[in-house]
Image (cartoon, rainbow, N blue to C red):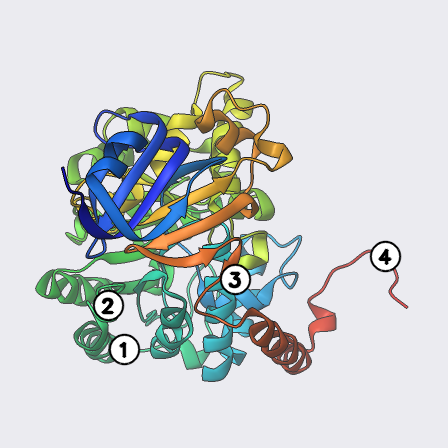
Amino acid sequence: MSSTQVDVVVDHVDWLVTVDEDRRVIRDAAVAIDGGRFVAVGKSDEVTAAYEGRQVVDGHHAVATPGLIDGHLHSSFQLSRGLADEANAREFLIARMYPYEAALTPDDVELSARLAAREMLLSGTTCFVDPGNNHPDRTVAGVAPSGIRVVVARSAFDLGDSAFGSVPSSMVSTPDSAAKEAEALVDRFHGEYDGRVRASVSFRGLNNSSDELITTLRDVAADREVLLQTHACFSYSTHDASVAKFGLPEIARLRELDALGPRTLLVHGGWLEPEEVAILQEHWASIVAAPTSSMHNGYGNIRVGVLPELMELGVNVGLGSDHACSGPVDLVREMFLVACGHKEVRVNPRVMPPERALEMATVNGAHAVDQAGVLGSIEVGKQADLVLFDTDDPSWQPLYNPVSNLVYSATGRTTKHVLVGGELVVEDGRLTRVDEDELLSDVRAGAASLYDRLDGEKLVRGRWPVS
């Protein structure tokens, strides 16, 4: 019997964690890929007998998972690492990140996005959601050449002052201008780069957004059938400010404005009123947890949050790394923190098992970005986004349970190969589309210039003398 020729065969994978409907884990597995999609998934001897790959990727000594989906990453903050330490929620945004963002040039945004794409791909992330900035076209220019998938947005505020704090005037728009910019972005980029770039609509924070802005952007998202995303309930300060100014906590306010639904993406979701749990269950909005961000800034989302209960009630919860200024952009590390953080604060080792954490970074992430039938699992017909982790790394041995090792022991830096749409974009731990040495040279120069413009010595809070 002759075999069918396909674009790629990945064979002899030690452990293939499919995260499919049956949650199969296949030993000595293989996948066949053609036209960017999985056409066969199964035992290596069966798949290789039926399919011949024009390109063959060796899966020996590897654990393979679906490509990881980062539900929230500010790619324009990638150059801010180390500039916002030991800052509470108000200081972090008002005194650190908003001035940083206002100082970014279009070239800075593109450079930051290039660096973010590198870190994500090299740690197994194949798709991410960017909440936006003032130059989203340069975000696309920065990330698209790497091969990663992105859901891009232009951020919007229309209230320069709120009980939470003030936003730089250069970042403030009007509902009408925000709507026109959002429409233009969706029309220009949604579905571009062979579908790897999608667009969304974003208002960055509830307390600096009027009812008119929220409802106007809600209508744009509904008309264009794209995601509507915002930060919500990430600290006591934002929760309290919402009640003080609008008379309602954040999720309840969104319900009043008819701005919740299956295409609504709410980032953080830690500080909820009891009624808001029921609201989320009723309206099918997705939450994206960002444990590193909460831990770094002391937001308390794990301590006061109810993510395990939300998921048991059927609320979809994904996972995000948020930004480089709170630590690594590594979704594998986020899985460890979301699992172990909840075990610690609940004093319950059964809460948040590793399988649930991996679901958050794969199938739940796909649902959150409105791509449940396309991404998030290794199944015939889905886009061939695949990560192979190197199990020769010390963190992977001994290996009895691949999901346990992935979540509790490994980091994203054990990524060996990454495929996006069947294309090998990381091979042996190096980007295939990007000159990494050139990128790092550009980053060192660009970061030094930005640091000078920001008077960075006032932002870095090191406690030890540097000579």
Q: What element carries label 1?
A: loop
Amino acid at the residue labelled 3: Leu
Q: Is residue 156 left or right of residue 182?
A: right
Amino acid at the residue labelled 1: Thr
Q: Kindly report which numbered mark, 4 or 2, lies closer to the viewer in this rendering.
A: 4
* Residue located beneath label 1 in the image: 174
Crowding at dot 1, Cα within 10 Å, few <14 / some 14-19 / many 20+, comes out as: some
Q: What element carries label 3?
A: helix
Q: Is mark 2 on a helix, strand or loop?
A: helix
Front in this rendered view, residue 131 or 395: 395
Q: Which quadrant holds the C terminus? A: bottom right
Q: Of callouts 3 and 1, which one flags the residue occurring earlier in the amino acid sequence?
A: 3
Amino acid at the residue labelled 2: Leu
Gap in angstroms between the C-alphas marked 3 and 2:
21 Å
* Residue located beneath label 4 in the image: 464
Front in this rendered view, residue 92 or 224: 224
Q: Residue at x 65, y 82 (%)?
A: 449
Estimate the x, y position of residue 21 in percent, counting from the top left: 21, 29
Estimate the x, y position of residue 164 in percent, counting from the top left: 46, 59
Gap in angstroms between the C-alphas marked 4 and 1:
45 Å
* Residue located beneath label 2 in the image: 213
Gap in angstroms between the C-alphas marked 3 and 1:
21 Å
CB atoms of marks 2 and 1 within 8 Å: yes
Q: Of callouts 4 and 2, which one flags the residue occurring earlier in the amino acid sequence?
A: 2
